[in-house]
Amino acid sequence: MKNILTLLCLIIASSSFAQIKMHGIVKDSIGAPLELANIIAINKESNTLESYAISDANGKYMLSLGKNGTYNVQVSYIGLKSVDETIETKEEDITKNFSLLSDNSLDAVELTYEMPVTIKGDTLIYNADSFKNGTERKLEDVLKKLPGVEINADGQIEVEGKVVNKLMVNGKDFFDGDSKLATKNIPSNAVDKVQVLRNYAEVGQLSGVQNNQDNVAINIRLKEGKENFWFGNVTAGGGVAPSPNDELYLVQPKLFYYSPDYSINVIGDLNNTGEVALTGRDIRNFGGGFRRPSNSSGTSINLGDNGLRGLTSLSDAQSIQSKLGALNFSYSPNKALDLSGFVIYNSNRLNTRQESFVRYTNPELGIPDEETVQTGKEATNQGLAKFSARYKPNANNQLDYDILGRISDDSEVNNEYSSVIGNTNQLNEAKPFSINQNVNYYYTLNDNNIFAFEAQHLFKDEDPFYNALLVNDPTNNDDADRDAFDNTAEGLGLDRTQFGYDLNQDRRIKSNQLDAKLDYYNILNSKSNINLTLGTILSTQKFNSNIFQFLDDGTFYDPTANLTNADGDLLRNENDIEYNFSDVYLGVHYRLKTGKFTITPGFSVHAYGNKNTQFGETYEDNFFKILPDFETQIQFKKSESLTFRYNMQNSFTDVTSLAEGLVMNNYNSIQYGEPELQNALSHNLSLRYFSFNLFNYTNVFAMLNYNKNIDQIRSVTNFDNVIRTNTYFNSNFADESVNFFGRVQRTYGKLRASLGVNYNYSKNNQFIQDIRSVNESFSQSYTPELRTNFREAPNVSLKYQYRVSNTNQGANDTQFITNAPSIEFDAYIWDALTFRTDYSYTKQSSNVGPSDSYQTWNANLSYRKDKDAKWEYELRASNLLNIDSNLNNGSNNISVYSSETFVLPRFITFRLTYTL
């Protein structure tokens, strides 16, 4: 790392010490400063763009130029005659003012180069070619180089700290705005402009009456010649894995067609190299552009997720086989009607292995330490299909309809060896499906009255099945050293005379939910409007489950539980419950603009009703609640604002937390619900600041959140050995959390520097075996990064993450420290070779165990005759150091743990890409 730092410092020094500054003020003919004037400097020797600037609110600009050079400086402003002057630099900085004159003929100087960045209202436009150096292959390679744009750890695009929730290509939705599919597949050489649409309004009729400051969209403009022609690329490759019986393969067609009337996008992926386009989690989170009408009503109801959880990261797998087929289309038969949709099929096959150790920190609980070894196979088959129609005959009417269907066939086979329980084989299966429909109608009566109706219906059917085969010696049931699972088996009412427990659980959860509202906007004047909302949420959930046992002779046994709840009532091994929820609400909001302030106070009045019926008993609760909310925004200038928000929220749980019968999450995790659970109330406050200054290329974003939960739904956990049983209740003790995130980014010539900081504090009340404890945790992380952006020379990105996590568990305090430096390097050599490599090193130390570390190193070398060549040849290597596992340590309120997750071995593949 020392050599890397030295190299980076030399690069920075060579690019900084040879620079001088040219600065001044751009004015109009009467001497008034011009904001957002464009200034570019072209090196006359190389005829390349050397530097650019955009004047600030005071007309100031600043260019970075080389010493002893000659430059053509061009200054332009919409509606004024451009200026074109030749500037010769010496050894000292230059002060130079410009005055732009009116010119009705607009016979402006022809600009040799486009501005890399321009601003038009709320739209920020990046000229992609200004940031490319030839090593880019996908859209994400371009976006990473744009000031103010980030690709986060989940592959999502962030602008000014806000996640981009819509992505379009030539104004047409790309897979309903999913940014990950776009960044991983759209070829970089097709991208002309990246348009960042801030304060984006999905419905133009509501743009003047709604606050859209959290809505950010990106529109990718294609290069000329890409319309009415197929473009894209097809990649095929292979290689040899460390195991002689495994051959690597990869086929990835990515084809696109755009015309003024319709578009077609086709993405395919077939490989076993671990390069998964979409994970199972990505598919489950693929919202298809749906947003709940009641999202800002103050009510939150959780319908639960009873499908297989799957892996959190595909880096946790030892082997991966992936298949993806995706088709997206749009068609506009006339100016009033737009049709669009997509079909996605995704299939993954994974082999996993994880070894872990858990040590419980409270000896009074009597829980033994546990070592486990888990090996598993996971298979997921997922399909999504969506159709959308938008009919807008005129500016006053818009009708939208969407339908999204999804279906899955998932299974997971797992073998777990526990030093306490012994050997256990497990099977999880689920075939859930859902249909989501959305109808919206927007009507503008006149200049002062707007109506909006939004309705969404969701039907979801989930059928998870669980099977566990556990060891049992029926001859020691009454011994002091009997099997660790025997007490749990006795509590479940199992037949303990069997040589092993064949334990099963069937579940079926059906959910129906209607979420609808009618909004009326009355525009009082140019500064204010009032919004009235009448809405409702109606949902029904039906839940059935049954725990049963197969005996050694193959017969079926339906046990009767011997466990009791806190009231001494005997629990059941089955559930049959219907849960109905209703919320009818009326909301009132007033929006006022005065000077730099936009103030939006409001409240909503809710009539709640929830009822659940199980085993012949009905539990019902009906009540009223007023939920206030408030927002104020201070717009200091066009690209600088401060926003404060407060809202009170009512949260309701799903049916599984109300079901009083036993539910098995796992053989060592059992729960039963509380039919009289009430809602949880929370106070939420946030403060957001952002500033984007193109004068000195500085981007600042900061967010502070505070959350306080009252009557939070909590669980009491009881342990029998390492097997836990949870039940739910409304806690009388408030939980609190505070988190802060901020990022500062600034460009110095060819160097971009950024610093991200994150602070999180939480205080939670934990209940273990009827003992309440307060668990306080505080974490802090710092992520500085330096990135160069040369057009000709190689580029380096150096990042360092430092994280400290402290947990206070009464008498037990734990601290974990993570140091994670990483470097990325790319070079475009001889206009034909592209070399890219990345390396990361992660070290974690703590006060409760030894230090652990792991590292990753990947590289690829590709050749194409020139930038316009059709064929490209690539040699790619992943996990060059052949590291077999990643290490992770952590803690919670009762234990500290460490885990070793085995990963993909070293892969070396050769690939051939043909570009259309």
Image (cartoon, helix red, strand yellow):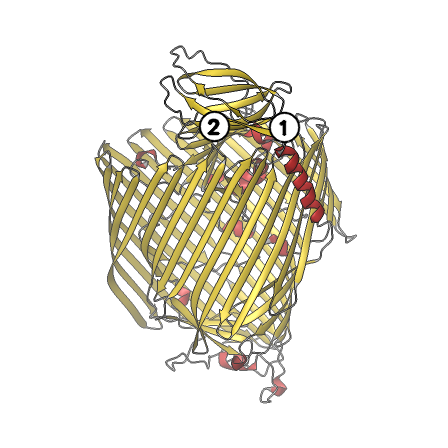
Horizontal arrangement in the rendering, residue 596 relative to residue 898 (left or right): left
Q: Position of residue 891 (x, y in %)?
A: 55, 67
Does 304 sit left or right of 228 as displayed? left
- Residue 109, compared with residue 26, is above or below; it is above
User: Residue 584, image x and y in percent?
Assistant: 26, 54
Q: Quadrant of the C terminus?
A: top right
Q: Farthest residue in the front direction?
A: 92
Real-space CA distance between mark 2 and mark 1, rounded to the nearest whole angstrom = 42 Å
The image quadrant of residue 862 is top right
Disc on res. 799 = none
Q: Indicate the position of residue 869 as horizontal and vertical percent values.
A: 68, 26
Q: Is residue 759 above or below residue 94?
A: below
Pick the front one: 173 or 136: 136
The amino acid type found where label 1 is placed reads Leu
Q: Which residue is mark 2?
A: 61
* Residue annotated with mark 1: 916
Q: Is residue 10 above or below residue 741?
A: above
Q: In this rendering, would 332 be left or right of 46?
A: left
